[in-house]
Image (cartoon, rainbow, N blue to C red):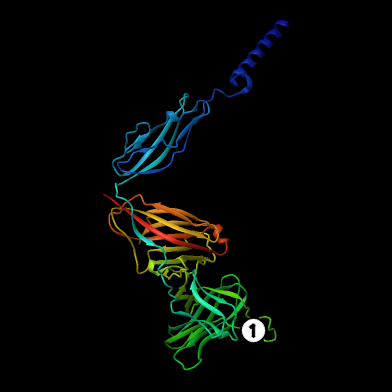
Amino acid sequence: MKKFNQVVALLLGLVMALSLAACGGEGGGNDGENTAPKISGVADQAVEAGSSFDALNGVTASDPEDGDLTGSITVTSNPALTFTGGKATPETAGSYELTYSVTDKGGKTAEAYATLTVTRKTGEAVEFMKLDFADYTPDTHGWTASIADGVQAAGEAKQGAFVFDITDPGAGDGDIQLKKAGVAVKPADYKLKVWAKSTKETYAHMFARNEAEEGWVLFGDTYNQKIGTSVTPIELNFTVSAEGTAELILNLGKITPNPDNPADSTPADFTVTIDKIELYEVTGTDIEVPVYTNDYSAPSAAALAVSAGDGANASVAGNVFTIANYPTEGGKLYYRIDQGGNTDFHNKLIVGHGGNKLTLPADSYFIVSVTGKATKPVSCGFFLNPMGGWDPRLSEGIDFTTEEQTFTFETTETLIMDMDFEMLFQFGSDALAGMGEVTVEISDITIQQRSVL
């Protein structure tokens, strides 16, 4: 029995010894398993042909067992480049795929990848186009402000809107007017929409006057339309029975909807902002066909346009159209977003539409700088895209803040022929959809050109 117990004890000791060995010895560690190294700091680069670059600048490698392996990193490329100490001088323009590799003492290898873009040799960058918005004058699309004598008010196009600063609304509703004459009409039903807000709740009357008739003969009218503190549309529906012209009128002077309640009336010392005006022809199926839209946000001289998608309002209707800028002192472009959509194509500010094309010449690289800020932090996608398709030569992001900043981007490919482009600022995200009103103020857009030698 004693001998049996000795055998059992010997076997137990052997099992314990084997268990400790399997666990890596004392402390129960797992020192026998090798962990792969890690490469950090690898990023895409761009360099001009004939210029040296350091592929290892900012790149490190580490390993849990072996420590710092930065000195052991090797770099290869496809097409092949000759690296010495991580440096190479590519002579041929094109795209090179870089592979970074490091192996630890246990034989495990880590790899990382990047793209090297080699551009053609060029001369110095020179200014190709500058949109500083300083020389543009307002185009009010035929809309004019009319203020009666002695009434303390002023109406003008500024900061991306038609703005009425009203100290005293006068004695009657017609003492302050915004109107447009000579609007061509035909036998049809129409809807006039005026998107507006006020610093204090106020009222407006709207009229469509038949210019073919003497005196005050109307196609339609609506009264006591309330203008609140957020941008919303007020509407006038009217019917035309013969071809002719109409004068469209918005009265903002003194209005008291209920004479028995004189306190409910047009206030004093307030500002009304007209963000956009739309006129639609309404078909028999109640489909609204845009006749025109007058918007107050961007410079026609710079060939800018804007568009907004369903559920979004960025001082525009649903279609792209050319509009006019209303700069303040010093020359600013104001792009107003009253209700942002949740995808980036909902609100667009576009350079390159209209009478002045954005044509970029062949055999050149382009540097685009945008200087601006916003009333709230807001982000947008920024694209430089050939007209007629979708193949952006720049695809970047801009984060506007309340402090003015300059954002600079450079193309990495030359054109084989002169091409027309659109420069897109695309706003839209879940954050923007819930942000409310925001205005982007752009003071400068400059394009520089580096011509290939």
Horizontal arrangement in the rendering, residue 352 relative to residue 432 (left or right):
left
Quarter assignment of residue 170: bottom right
Q: Height in image: 239 above or below 40?
A: below
Numbered-mark total: 1
- Residue 103, x across and y down, in percent: 44, 28
Rate crowding at label 1 as few (under 14), some (14 to 19) or many (20 or more) other CA atoms within 10 Å.
Answer: some
Quadrant where the image shows the N terminus: top right
Q: Secondary structure at mark 1?
A: loop
Residue at 28%, 50% in the rendered image: 452
Is 261 in front, or is 390? Answer: 261
Q: Position of residue 428 (x, y in %)?
A: 51, 59
Note whether 120 is above or below 109 in the view shown: below
Q: Residue at x 42, y 72 (%)?
A: 137
Residue of label 1: 257
What x and y, as percent, mark residue 264?
A: 67, 80
- Residue 265 appears in view: yes
Residue at image point 59% right, 70% down: 230
Residue 309 visible in this rendered orientation of the protein? no
Amino acid residing under circle 1: Pro
Q: Is residue 357 left or right of residue 277?
A: left
The quarter of the picture where residue 234 lies is bottom right
Where in the figure is residue 276, as x and y percent of width and height?
Answer: 50, 73
